[in-house]
Amino acid sequence: MFPPNIMEACLKQYSTILKRPKNYNESDNATDLREWDIGGRMEGSTNILGLVVFSVVLGITLGEMKAKGKPLLNVFVSLSDAIMKITKLVIW
């Protein structure tokens, strides 16, 4: 369930897959879920929670680094300013 790398955690979502047991009867709703095979796979949809957690952890880390984290923080501030200027151009 835990992704092998941070990029996969941000770009894909984990999905649980239930496989029917061999003796499954669709008309009988009393099938015990413990008999089902439970698996999982990573699907290609954006994992917003992964992005938010990574962003928060990065922000906290940069804040604690003080002067050492300032250059990277300045990059993000400049990037934010540039994106806001592009957004204003597109809106107006």
Image: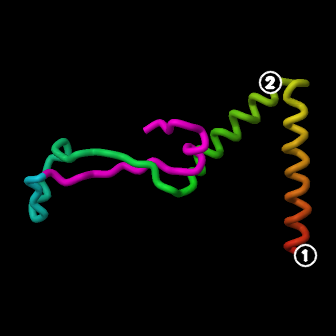
Q: Residues within 10 Å of mark 2 (few under 14, many from 20)?
A: few
> How is colour applied across the structure in the image?
rainbow
The amino acid type, in three-letter code, at marker 1 is Trp
Q: Which residue is mark 1?
A: 92
Judging from the image, what secondary structure is the residue with disc 2 in?
Answer: helix
The amino acid type, in three-letter code, at marker 2 is Glu
Mark 1 or mark 2, which is nearer the start of the sequence? 2
Residue 29: where, in percent of width, then height? Answer: 14, 58
Which residue is located at x 91 percent, y 24 percent?
A: 67
Residue 88: where, in percent of width, then height? Answer: 89, 67
Question: Horizontal placement of 23 versus 92: left or right?
Answer: left
Residue stretch rendered in magenta on the structure: 1-21
Question: Horizontal placement of 55 versus 27: left or right?
Answer: right
Q: Does the segment drawn in magenta span residue 16?
A: yes
Q: Which residue is mark 2?
A: 64
Q: Does the segment drawn in magenta span residue 17?
A: yes
Question: Horizontal placement of 39 versus 34: left or right?
Answer: right
Pick the quarter of the image with the N terminus: top left
Pick the quarter of the image with the C terminus: bottom right
